[in-house]
Image: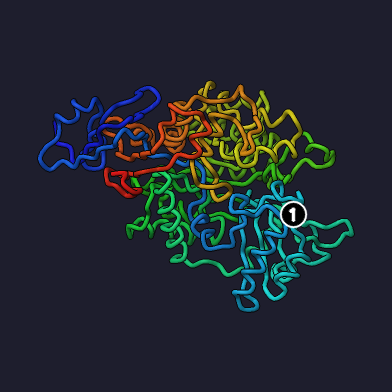
């Protein structure tokens, strides 16, 4: 047998759902060479083999976030941090951070913030435009809710976006007003677009920096692969150019499957197709994935499109961002071009629209193993589950939503419906290949709350979201490794620690199998290996 370049030994190495545990693992180049007992693997070592003693630590295949926004995360690291877990739990705390930013900037400079959750603010409401005006009278301000589907802007920002008192409601969006009928600054879905476009746009080099910055942070968490969920959503074609440049110049820290925007206005499909960039094209660091369209919003923003109204809001069914005809046309185009699809659809009305479009696309042009997906897929009906099974549609849900947004789901949907949301157990037992992800920066990029969400089905306050849908530790890891790879046709090269697969490995200080689920939240990544090379080491992990 080939002499290994590196050996990991004296550990508890989880190799996969069927493979179970090994004591040691041998790496040759960038791939796994063998797994086995410590003695078996030690016998393979040569004089030049690098030996890493894990000291009993817990190792798993490199974690794979199957739906997140890497470049946005990198950009957000430089913006005003409004996350609840960063201490913003009241309107005043939010305003204090905006005011502090305004004091550091010249008049006219934009203040961009991200991550507030009005369900976790003491006042249980969004900030008002006038409150932002008071603390930043000379700067345009736009603050995005954690979900990314709602934002609040001050007067200068609304003016920059051409939004005034008489501006009509845009299709697929909503301009908020207060009880007096005046603009409140709240913008939902497509209503955010004019204000976003009025802001200074990042350059390709800015995006490369953001990709590298965000990717380095992911390595510290044991994440070695991601599906970038929306290339082209901001500045369009330049985002694809940035990913290509980051890969070509060696500045892509993690493996990326890139989802291309193919929506009505945010659409780079023809640009990519003209370069021959269809699903599957690329290398082991950057590969073209599916095509994204938006059909609705978010539950927390009351904009996910539902067939029944929101709890205690009898006239609110959410916001459809597309109609059936538009969805059919966009899906059919991408399907016939050979792309996998990954539409955003959270509410059951939106999910139904996507499934109807899939049925038409497959009828027009059958495509074995295309693996069309539904991103989020949080609130579907039993009949829609059967449609998904019949067409082998992959549900790409976010278990981190259960942890971070679970309490808010009860506020939005009532006492019963949240317990059936994101049904990972049902999906897994139905053979639908559910993956694990965070939708970062919608939630934290840390995979541990997402794993906890699948295993414990509890919010960050301990509220249960349906014990019947809990997964075992092994099943949750399987979703965050193998199934995430399967979702972008990569299961043959990564997702398990078996001979011939890429040697992407995350090492933690806690064995998830030996502790209560709550202890998983406190675990720390000690080492990350990408393609056989140690790319992150914490303290004395090596």
Label 1 sits on a secondary structure element that is loop
Q: Which residue is mark 1?
A: 126
Q: Quadrant of the N terminus?
A: top left
Residue at image position (61%, 39%) is: 460
Residue 32 quadrant: top left
Number of numbered discs visible in the structure rendering: 1
Give left or right: position of 357 versus 450: right
Residue 105 quadrant: bottom right
Give left or right: position of 372 versus 13: right
What x and y, as percent, mark residue 486? 43, 33
Residue at image position (25%, 42%) is: 30
Q: Is residue 414 visible?
A: yes
Q: Nearer the viewer, residue 87 or 131?
A: 87
What x and y, as percent, mark residue 514? 43, 26
Q: Quadrant of the C terminus?
A: top left
Crowding at label 1, few (<14), some or many (≥20) Cα neighbours within 10 Å? many
Give left or right: position of 265 versus 18: right
Looking at the image, which residue sits at the far bottom?
106
Q: Nearer the viewer, residue 431 or 267?
A: 431
Give the colouring mode of the picture.
rainbow
Q: Nearer the viewer, residue 347 or 362?
A: 347
Residue at image position (42%, 56%) is: 243
What x and y, as percent, mark residue 483? 45, 32
What x and y, as percent, mark residue 131? 76, 65
Please, is residue 207 above or below residue 109 in the view? above
Looking at the image, which residue sits at the far right?
180
Please, is residue 437 above or below residue 243 in the view? above
Q: Is residue 357 visible?
A: no
């Amino acid at each position: 047998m080939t002499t290994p370049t590196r050996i990991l030994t004296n550990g508890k190495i989880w190799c996969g759902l069927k493979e179970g545990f090994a004591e040691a693992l041998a790496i040759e180049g960038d791939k796994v060479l063998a797994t086995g007992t410590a003695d078996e693997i030690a016998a393979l070592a040569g004089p030049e083999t690098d030996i890493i003693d894990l000291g009993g630590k817990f190792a798993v295949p490199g974690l794979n976030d199957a739906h997140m926004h890497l470049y946005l995360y990198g950009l957000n690291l430089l913006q005003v941090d409004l996350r609840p877990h960063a201490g913003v739990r009241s309107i005043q705390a939010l305003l204090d951070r905006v005011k502090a930013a305004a004091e550091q900037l010249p008049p006219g400079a934009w203040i961009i913030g991200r991550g507030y959750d009005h369900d976790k603010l003491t006042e249980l409401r969004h900030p008002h435009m006038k409150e932002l005006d008071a603390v930043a009278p000379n700067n345009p301000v736009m603050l995005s809710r954690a979900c990314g589907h709602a934002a609040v802007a001050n007067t200068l920002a609304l003016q920059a976006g051409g939004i005034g008192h008489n501006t009509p409601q845009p299709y697929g969006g909503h301009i908020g007003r207060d009880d007096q009928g005046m603009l409140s600054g709240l913008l939902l879905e497509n209503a955010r677009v004019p204000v976003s476009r009025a802001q200074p746009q990042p350059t390709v080099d800015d995006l490369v920096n953001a990709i590298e910055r965000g990717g380095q942070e992911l390595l510290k968490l044991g994440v070695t692969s991601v599906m970038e969920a929306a290339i082209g959503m901001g500045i369009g074609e330049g985002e694809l150019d940035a990913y290509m440049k980051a890969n070509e110049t060696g500045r892509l820290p993690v493996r990326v499957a890139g989802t291309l925007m193919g929506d009505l206005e945010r659409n780079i499909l023809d640009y990519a197709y003209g370069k021959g960039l269809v699903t599957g094209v690329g290398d082991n660091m950057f590969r073209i994935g599916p095509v994204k369209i938006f059909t609705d919003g978010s539950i927390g923003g009351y904009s996910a499109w539902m067939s029944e109204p929101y709890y205690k809001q009898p006239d609110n069914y959410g916001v459809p961002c597309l109609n059936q005809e538009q969805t059919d046309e966009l899906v059919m185009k991408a399907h016939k071009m050979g792309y996998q699809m990954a539409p955003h659809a959270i509410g059951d009305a939106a999910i139904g629209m996507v499934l109807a479009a899939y049925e038409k696309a497959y009828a027009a042009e059958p495509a074995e193993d295309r693996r069309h997906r539904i991103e989020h897929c949080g609130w579907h009906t039993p009949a829609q589950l059967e449609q998904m099974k019949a067409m082998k549609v992959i549900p790409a849900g976010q278990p981190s939503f259960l942890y971070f947004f679970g309490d808010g789901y009860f506020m939005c949907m009532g006492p019963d419906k949240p317990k059936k949301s994101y049904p990972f157990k049902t999906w897994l037992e139905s053979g639908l290949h559910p993956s694990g992800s965070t939708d970062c920066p919608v939630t934290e990029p840390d995979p541990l709350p997402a794993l906890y969400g699948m295993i414990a089905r509890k919010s960050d306050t301990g509220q249960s979201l349906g014990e019947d849908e809990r997964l075992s530790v092994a099943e949750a890891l399987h979703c965050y490794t193998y199934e995430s790879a399967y979702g972008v046709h990569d299961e043959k090269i990564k997702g398990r620690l078996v001979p011939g697969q890429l040697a992407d490995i995350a090492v933690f200080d806690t064995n998830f199998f030996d502790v209560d689920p709550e202890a998983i939240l406190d675990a720390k990544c000690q080492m990350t290996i990408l393609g056989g090379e140690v790319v992150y080491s914490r303290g004395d992990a090596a």
